[in-house]
Structures are given as C-alpha cells and as structure tokens.
Amino acid sequence: MSNAQCLFCRIVAGEIPATKVAENADCLAFRDIGPQAPTHVLVIPKRHVGSLDALSDGALGAALLAMARDVARAEGIAADGYRVVTNTGANGGQSVAHLHFHVLGGRKLTWPPG
C-alpha cells in the first residue's frame, strides 16, 4: 500500500531518485539529502505507514530496526557508536508523514538533540 502524494512512497516507487544503501522486501535505506552527520541514512518501510504511532506490525518494526543496525555496521559507524531516531508528529519534528528512522554517526553526537 502506498500514498501517491507521499515523498517516501514516491522514492520507493522509483519516481524520485535516492542514493540507496540497503534494500529488502519490506524496507529501504537511503542517504538523507540534508545530512546532519557524516553518516545520515534514512530507513523506511516500503509500504506506507504514517508514523511510529501508526505502526501496528511488530515484525515490520523489528525489520526496520534490524536494517538500521545493519546499515550502521556497513557504514563503519557501529564500533564507535551511532544514533537511531524517529520523529513522530508535528511537535516531535516529523517533516515527512511516512515512518522513517534516521541512522546518524561518524562524529560525536551531542545531547539533548534540540
């Protein structure tokens, strides 16, 4: 299931180019176009899920987190540490209404984030 108006659904459909990092039947990982760290990759479900709050499939959630871990390992940031974050809703900073996890690393990350 996809949403024709959704930016990330359009990336999954191949209508908008993205630099893919990893892909399987359920998930896609690609580089963020406005990176906030030396490594900044987005991991998304291939089917439209509006946010973490809308996620009802635990297996899909596990697959997304496993891909985030695998991306961190493949990008060489796992040994030094990395961050996986998702924003939910307007006050949470979600800018695209499609569930996505940011995998950030390659430098010391500070806390709180903002």
Image: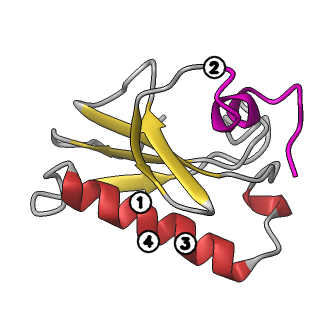
For residue 25: magenta? no
Camera-near label (2 vs 4) is 2
In the rendered image, is residue 95 in sight?
A: no
Q: Secondary structure at mark 3?
A: helix
* Residue stretch rendered in magenta on the structure: 1-15
Report the residue marked by disc 4: 66
Q: Is residue 35 above or below residue 67?
A: above
**Label 1 packing within 10 angstroms: few (<14), some (14-19), many (20+):** many
Residue 16 is tagged as: 2
Q: Which mark is residue 63?
A: 3
| Residue ID at (54%, 20%) | 17
Task: Using the image, tell me which numbered label, if any, was put on residue 82.
Answer: none
Main SS, magenta region, reads loop
How busy is the neighbourhood of tag 3: few (under 14 within 10 Å), some, or many (20 plus)?
some
Q: Which element is circle 1 on? A: helix
- Image-quadrant location for residue 73: bottom left
